[in-house]
Image: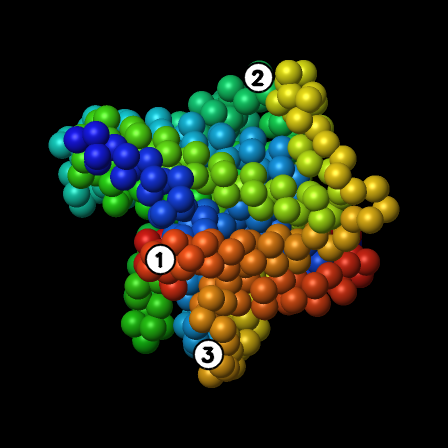
Amino acid sequence: MANTYKTIVKDGLWNNNGVFSMLLGMCPAMAMTTSATNGFGMGLATAVVMAASSLLVALFRKLITPEVRIPVYILIVAAMVTLVDLAMNAWMHELYKVLGLFIPLIVSNCLPLARLEAFAAKQPVLPSLLDGLFMGLGFTIALTAIGAVREITGNGTLFADASLLLGPAFKAIELRLLPADMGVLMMILPPGGFLVTGLLVVVKRLLDLRAGKEIQMGGAHSVA
Amino acid sequence: MRDFILMMIGAALVNNVILARFLGLCSFMGVTTRIDTAAGMGLATTFVITVSSMADWAVQHWLLDAYGLGYLRTVTFILVIASAVQFTELTIKKVSPELFQMLGIYLPLITTNCAVLGVALLLVEGHMSFIAATLFAFASSVGYSLVMVIFAGLRERLALAQVPRLFAGPPLGFIVASLLAMAFMGFSGIATN
């Protein structure tokens, strides 16, 4: 059993990473990664929604009739998103203002729905919770990575404004790596989002190839 | 009148749904392998975005605002969108069975297209009038369809090219999309919105 849990964690964080392997949840992965801090915040919000909705779906999986399962899943995710939305508005208002539109849009993010359909609908409660959580954390890692590359190349900073958005404790991780005038503005603008995501998918394929693993050529677009 | 035209150009080209706002990327990557499916998807999505945005506007103003239920917005909108998709499916089936045959499998997927929910949320947060909101939704979805068709055209050519194995498929798609986004940035300055 411990082995299964290890696989779930590994799959979520790296092997089956939501963004770089399955190519799901691309919209926030590009829109909210103008800085590493934004990516990190967006990823964590999604992870909370995914863990909570996986838990709920796994709890009620025997009561949900297969014919109406998709609307039920969407409503469960929507309810969780509303909770996260209100909580962030109350306690992390600065971050909430930056992420804005993309918090409610977690509802139509393909990744939570894909995991509910593929995993939580069939598995017991604990594995489902772990799967939701670690898929969400893998998503967070991916978004932070994309954000970090875009921020360093575009602005020369890393985790700028982290103390403002996440809390004063994060002051220490704010870094300036390059002088302010060395940034390539394009990396922060929309084209940079597509470019960095594309290149990071290639980097993941390269690392997988080095490690002697199969590389995944397509995405999981049949899901959404 | 001039304001409306500028707003529509802004919504369709300058702040393009896909290339500037990053909405609807799943369908952008998923169904753009052929021009005709991309065009069909664009058409169906245009219809759904316009209809559901009008419905969402009405729900927001006459139901949620009127009774102070703002916190239910996400849940209500996704229900309205799901119903609009169902309605679209029924209408197309009745009016044009050929089009229904062509779009068949893509129709239900529009519910999880974040461009639909995204446009609805944008126009509610922009505090637009009903006419402005409808035009905004229509123009945004026309911009969406335009980019879908352009990208499908590029990918049809790309499918025939010899590319390094590591870049094959989605990564190269993203890099091409990046160039396309750069081209669309040329529109900025025409209209702001």
Q: Nearer the viewer, residue B59 or A8?
A: A8
Q: Are marks 3 and 1 on the same chain?
A: no
Q: Chain of mark 3?
A: B
Circles 2 and 3: CB atoms closer than 8 Å: no
Q: Dot 2, how many residues are within 10 Å of its Cα: few (below 14), some (14-19), or many (20+)?
A: few
Closer to us: mark 1 or mark 2?
Answer: 1
Alpha-carbon distance for marks 3 and 1? Answer: 27 Å
- Determine the secondary structure under disc 3: loop
Q: Are marks 1 and 2 on the same chain?
A: yes
Q: Dot 1, how many residues are within 10 Å of its Cα: few (below 14), some (14-19), or many (20+)?
A: few
Looking at the image, residue A122 lies above or below residue A153: above
Look at label 1 and name its amino acid. Gly
Closer to us: mark 3 or mark 1?
Answer: 1
Check disc 3 and report the residue beneath it.
B159
Alpha-carbon distance for marks 2 and 3? Answer: 49 Å
Q: Are marks 2 and 3 on the same chain?
A: no
Check disc 2 and report the residue beneath it.
A90
Q: Dot 3, how many residues are within 10 Å of its Cα: few (below 14), some (14-19), or many (20+)?
A: few
Circles 3 and 1: CB atoms closer than 8 Å: no
Check disc 1 and report the residue beneath it.
A212
Q: Nearer the viewer, residue B116 or B80?
A: B116
Q: Position of residue A108 (x, y in %)?
A: 43, 44
